[in-house]
Amino acid sequence: VSLAIAERMAAPWALADLGAIRRKLAASFAPAMRDRVEGLRARIRIGQAASGPVLGSLRAPDAETVGRLFEAFVETRTIRFAYRGTGPETQRRVEPQMLMLNYPVWYVLAWDLDRQAVRTFRCDRMRSVAVTAEAFRLRPPADFVAALEGAQAAAP
């Protein structure tokens, strides 16, 4: 997944053909693992670089938040967390369906269980993430088109 992201971002340090390296690495996996990796890769999008105002308010997310979010994303389990956007802090309960990178800012594209709608959350604004035992089914990518449009996101 990391190689695919670097390839999509046209990383200047990546002078080699990362696509060929990624394909060789994927070929070394058992078919079931290869399918799982491809499924995860399809749920990660790369958008434009973050704007100046976004960069000005960016804080590094804590390692515990990132670890729990990653766990829930890979295992397709819901999460609860406190979120502080531009308004007051809210408590959220969501299905982390997709991740989006607007370098260097990561976002979670989620199905909000309480609002019954797609919502986007900046990872650095998430606090007290708790992974629940509740598993969820992936929703069709078409459900997230509007959330991805402004970012001009593409699959890695």
Image (cartoon, rainbow, N blue to C red):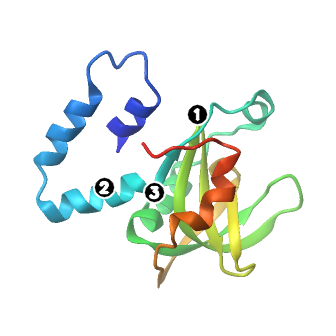
- In this view, which residue lies farthest toward the bottom? 134
Give the amino acid type for the residue marked by disc 1 in the picture: Tyr
Q: In this view, does 97 lie to the left or right of 128?
A: left
In depth, the one of 78 and 119 nearer the eye is: 119
Mark 2 and 1 residues: CB-CB less than 8 Å, in contact?
no
Residue 23, given in percent of the width and then of the height, sits at: 20, 40
In depth, the one of 147 and 51 nearer the eye is: 147
Specify which label sits upstream in the sequence, 1 or 3: 3
- Between circles 2 and 1, the one closer to the viewer is 2
Quarter location, residue 50:
top right
Quarter location, residue 92:
bottom right
- Residue beneath disc 1: 103
The quarter of the rendered structure image containing the C terminus is: top left
Mark 1 crowd level (few <14, some 14–19, many ≥20, 10 Å Cα):
some
The quarter of the rendered structure image containing the N terminus is: top left
Give the amino acid type for the residue marked by disc 2 in the picture: Glu
Quarter location, residue 7:
top left
Mark 2 and 3 residues: CB-CB less than 8 Å, in contact?
no
Residue 120, given in percent of the width and then of the height, sits at: 68, 58
Mark 2 crowd level (few <14, some 14–19, many ≥20, 10 Å Cα):
few
In depth, the one of 152 and 122 nearer the eye is: 152
Residue 11, given in percent of the width and then of the height, sits at: 43, 22
Specify which label sits upstream in the sequence, 2 or 1: 2
- In this view, which residue lies farthest toward the right? 87
- Residue beneath disc 3: 43
Mark 3 crowd level (few <14, some 14–19, many ≥20, 10 Å Cα):
some
Q: Is residue 25 left or right of residue 37?
A: left
Give the amino acid type for the residue marked by disc 3 in the picture: Arg
- Residue beneath disc 2: 38
Per the image, label 3 sits on a secondary structure element best described as loop
